[in-house]
Amino acid sequence: MDETPSEQVRRLVRRTIEALEAQSVHDEALGVMREPRGFSVFRTAPMIVPAGRAWRLGVLLVDRAGGVYETGDVTRAIEPLRAVTNRSAEAEARRDDRRAAARGKFPEGEVVNHRFAPLALDDESLAGGSGPLEVNDGIVMVHWDRTSPGRGVSTLDRYLADRVSVLTLD
């Protein structure tokens, strides 16, 4: 009997987790932004707070429980130095993210994935496209480069195997 798309995803993710754990591949922190609370001058600063751990596999994050997420932004938990030259809005936003992660009780220098999105892995959601995942002729596919239509697409099986091989190089 053929597997449903959701069964394919569960099997492939389980196999990926087993391979990553067998090789003791380091995972990374997941964090969610906690917006400032309070009022006026008595507001708390924004911070990214811990929300678990996952392996970053390109456009996907996979946690030990089999959860799959679309990768969002990545930062480090460090207190940034004062910017002298580059004052672009994007650079300031990255500095703010680093500062928010440093406030969030992550170890100094920890890589923190945030603004990620959980993917729906049921058959109906996969058939309609769940983030970078979609079903094509009964096979789950990953769009790892959405800027090039027709390119940057792989089967989930091949994509995860490739990502694991990159992380387990000796």
Image: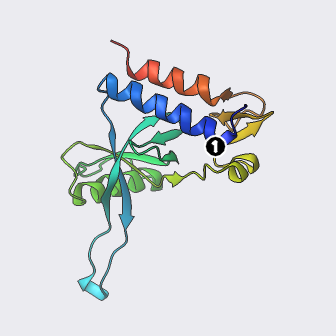
What amino acid is labelled 1 in the image?
Answer: Ser
Task: State the SS at label 1.
Answer: helix
Give percent across and percent down for residue 136: 78, 35
Q: Position of residue 143 (x, y in %)?
A: 66, 36
Find disc 1 in the rendering and name its residue. Answer: 6
Quadrant occupied by the N terminus = top right
Q: What residue occupies the far bottom of the structure in this picture?
A: 39
Q: Residue furthest front?
A: 1
Query: Residue shown at 69%/37% (left/top)?
Result: 147
Judged left or right of residue 131, residue 62 is: left
Q: How many marks?
A: 1
Q: Quadrant of residue 39?
A: bottom left
Residue 103's x, y, as percent?
Answer: 23, 60
- In the image, is 145 to the left or to the right of 164? right
Of 167 and 66, nearer the camera is 66
Residue 73, placed above or below residue 8: below
Image point (39%, 55%), residue name: 92
Q: Quadrant of the C terminus?
A: top left
In the depicted view, which residue is nearer to us: 86 or 78? 78
What is the image's colouring?
Answer: rainbow
Q: Tell me the crowding category of disc 1: few under 14, some 14 to 19, or many 20 or more residues within 10 angstroms, Cα based.
A: some
Describe residue 58's horizontal placement relative to residue 29 as left or right.
right
Classify residue 37 by image quadrant.
bottom left
Q: Nearer the viewer, residue 33 or 69?
A: 69
Residue at the extreme right = 137
Q: Position of residue 36 (x, y in %)?
A: 33, 75
